[in-house]
């Protein structure tokens, strides 16, 4: 196997392989993202990055610590506008 034109390389360990940092940065791969593997007819592998930037908590600002809270009353309602 020739190393000509190789952008990065990683080693398989326990059926897992790390994605090199340079590739992660270039493709903006982050925790929670999914990789879809496609085996091409010529034997090459194509990987599609499915970014998980949207979801249940994507728009949730969270607790900044600036307000006093009462966990008994506020726990389940935090971040929900009450009418």
Image (spheres, grey):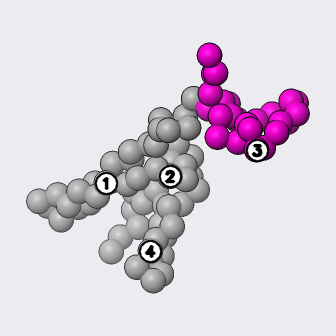
The answer to which of marks 4 and 1 sits earlier in the sequence is 4
From the image, tell me which residue sits under label 1. 36
Q: Quadrant of residue 14?
A: bottom left
Query: On the image, which quarter does residue 38 sit in?
Result: bottom left
At mark 2, the secondary structure is loop
Please tell me which residue is depicted at 62% across the width and 32% down the height of the picture: 60
What count of labels does the image hold? 4
Q: Are marks 3 and 1 in contact (CB under 8 Å)?
A: no
**Picture quarter with the C terminus:** top right
Q: Residues within 10 Å of mark 3 (few under 14, many from 20)?
A: few
Q: Which residue is mark 2?
A: 32
Q: Secondary structure at mark 3?
A: helix
Point out the frontmost of discs 2 and 1.
Answer: 2
Residue named by callout 3: 72
Q: Residue 54: x, y in percent?
A: 47, 35
Q: Is residue 42 magenta?
A: no
- To which quarter of the image does residue 50 belong? top left
Query: What segment is highlighted magenta in the picture?
Result: 60-83
């Amino acid at each position: 196997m020739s190393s000509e034109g190789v952008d990065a390389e990683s080693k398989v360990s326990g059926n897992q392989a790390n994605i090199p940092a340079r590739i992660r940065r270039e493709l903006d791969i982050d925790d929670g993202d999914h990789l879809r593997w496609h085996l091409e007819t010529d034997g090459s592998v194509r990987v599609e990055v499915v970014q998980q930037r949207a979801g249940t908590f994507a728009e949730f600002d969270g607790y900044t610590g600036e307000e006093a809270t009462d966990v008994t009353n506020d726990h389940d309602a935090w971040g929900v506008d009450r009418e």
